[in-house]
Image: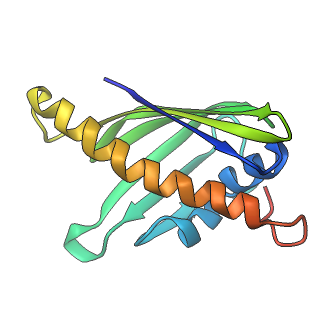
């Protein structure tokens, strides 16, 4: 089952897009996470791995970019080994600012399907906090301080 988070921002849509798609820059905004990316710029077929945690408790989240429609939408498929599912992200103009819509389905391979509602509720709370930090970063960013995306 998927969950959707919608957040409005005072940042322009292109600025929010730049923060969201600076995948190596996610290390600054997602607690205890390191990012390894394919070389080059994001495009369909490009992969990255976000590893959250340390040591034996580290959870790698390997993702493949399957839709890339700058500056409005991208979609990732989670390839495992621990997590499967997908993420669909869109950024739209909303008055002078923007709106982020993040829809995600995350399925831990080792969890029984009966526990999926607990996984969804926990993931939604965690992602809402993290996405709020992305919005805040976009609102504080200037063109000179944005990462390359």
> In screen coordinates, is 62 left or right of 21?
left
Instruction: State the count of labels.
Output: 0
Residue located 35% across and 48% down the image: 125
Q: Residue furthest bottom?
A: 55
Q: What percent of the width, then of the height, locates residue 107?
A: 27, 35
As displayed, is residue 48 above or below residue 119?
Answer: below
Asked whether the viewer can see residue 149, the reply is: yes
Residue located 80% across and 62% down the image: 148
Location of the N terminus (image quadrant) = top left
Q: What percent of the width, then of the height, locates residue 103?
A: 49, 30
Near-viewer residue (54 or 95):
95
Asked whether the viewer can see residue 108, the reply is: no
Near-viewer residue (112 or 17):
17
Residue located 73% across and 58% down the image: 138
Give the colouring mode of the picture. rainbow
Q: Residue furthest right?
A: 144
Q: What percent of the width, then of the height, locates residue 69?
A: 76, 30
Residue located 22% across and 40% down the image: 119
As displayed, is residue 68 above or below residue 127?
Answer: above
Q: Quadrant of the rendered structure where residue 56 is? A: bottom left
Near-viewer residue (65 or 145):
145
> In screen coordinates, is 64 left or right of 145?
left
Location of the C terminus (image quadrant) = bottom right
> In screen coordinates, is 116 left or right of 138?
left
């Amino acid at each position: 089952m998927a969950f959707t988070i919608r957040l409005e921002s005072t940042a322009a849509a292109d600025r929010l897009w730049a923060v969201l798609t600076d995948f190596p820059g996610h290390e600054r905004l997602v607690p205890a996470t390191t990012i390894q990316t394919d070389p080059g710029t994001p495009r369909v077929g490009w992969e990255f791995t976000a590893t959250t945690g340390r040591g034996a408790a580290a959870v790698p989240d390997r993702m493949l970019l399957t839709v890339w429609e700058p500056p409005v939408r991208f979609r990732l498929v989670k390839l495992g080994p621990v997590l499967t599912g997908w993420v669909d992200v869109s950024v739209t103009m909303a008055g002078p600012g923007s709106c982020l819509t993040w829809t995600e389905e995350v399925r831990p391979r080792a969890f029984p399907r009966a526990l999926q509602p607990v996984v969804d509720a926990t993931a939604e709370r965690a992602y809402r906090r993290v996405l709020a930090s992305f919005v805040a970063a976009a609102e504080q960013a200037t063109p000179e301080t944005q990462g390359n995306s």
